[in-house]
């Protein structure tokens, strides 16, 4: 599965939801998390011009630093914080925790209903972020003119 700019969000989310079955539900959770992070990063890139004097966290990875980077980007036009765009931030972060539990080996299986609820919350957050971006000139499904957060999530050390 590829995440391409030419995808529609509807088709991408349908593809992710297709993994919601007894055997593959954790794959849907991981893909939903990837979709959310892809969307947030692209909207941030679309909101900020390279000439803007914006300070981002050195390493942009994880919900806390995405929220900080989002805050820096939207401060230019007095936009909403990421937690407001997403809606019920507490429920969202609780749903997103399943991604962390799987990736970091704390959980290897889950019930289908448990996964469905979490995937739905994560994809709803992606949709809200994409809608906010589109309404503010930063549609994540359009080709970017520039990239602000592109590249590695952490500065690489020279050898």
Image (cartoon, rainbow, N blue to C red):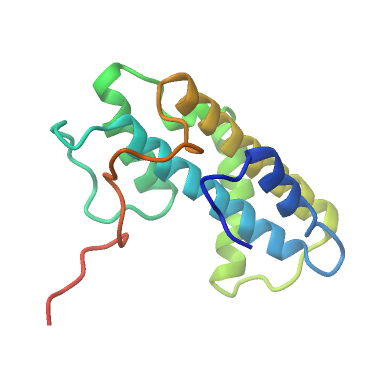
The tally of labels here is 0
Q: Residue visible at 60% across and 34% down? A: 127
- x%, y% of residue 10? 69, 38
Which residue appears farthest toward the bottom when viewing the image?
A: 159
Q: Please state if 36 lies on the left or on the right of 154 as rendered.
A: right
Q: Residue visible at 27% across and 62% down? A: 154
Of the 4 image quadrants, the one containing the N terminus is bottom right
Residue 29 position by quadrant: bottom right
- x%, y% of residue 13? 69, 45
- x%, y% of residue 24? 78, 67
Residue 66 appears in the rendering = yes
Q: Residue visible at 47% across and 36% down? A: 142
Q: Please state if 108 lies on the left or on the right of 99 as rendered.
A: right
Q: Please state if 69 lies on the left or on the right of 89 as rendered.
A: left
Residue 84 appears in the rendering = no
Q: Please state if 74 lies on the left or on the right of 88 as rendered.
A: left
Against 17, is 110 above or below? below
Residue 61 position by quadrant: bottom left
Which residue appears farthest toward the top when viewing the image?
A: 78
Of the 4 image quadrants, the one containing the C terminus is bottom left
Against 89, is 148 above or below? below
Q: Nearer the viewer, residue 147 or 98?
A: 147
Against 159, is 123 above or below? above
- x%, y% of residue 80? 41, 21
Against 152, is 75 above or below? above
Q: Residue visible at 84% across and 58% down? A: 112
């Amino acid at each position: 599965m590829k995440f391409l700019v030419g995808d529609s969000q509807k088709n991408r989310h349908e593809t992710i939801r297709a993994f919601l079955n007894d055997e593959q539900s954790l794959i849907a959770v991981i893909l939903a998390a990837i979709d959310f992070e892809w969307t947030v990063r692209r909207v941030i890139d679309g909101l900020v011009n390279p000439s803007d004097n914006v300070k981002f966290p050195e390493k942009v990875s994880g919900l806390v630093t995405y929220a900080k980077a989002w805050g820096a980007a939207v401060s230019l036009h007095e936009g909403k914080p990421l937690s407001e765009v997403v809606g019920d931030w507490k429920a969202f972060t609780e749903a997103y925790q399943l991604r962390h539990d799987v990736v970091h080996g704390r959980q290897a299986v889950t019930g289908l209903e448990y996964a469905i609820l979490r995937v739905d919350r994560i994809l709803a957050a992606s949709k809200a972020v994409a809608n906010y971006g589109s309404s503010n000139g930063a549609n994540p499904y359009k080709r970017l003119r520039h990239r602000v957060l592109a590249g590695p999530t952490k500065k690489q050390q020279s050898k």
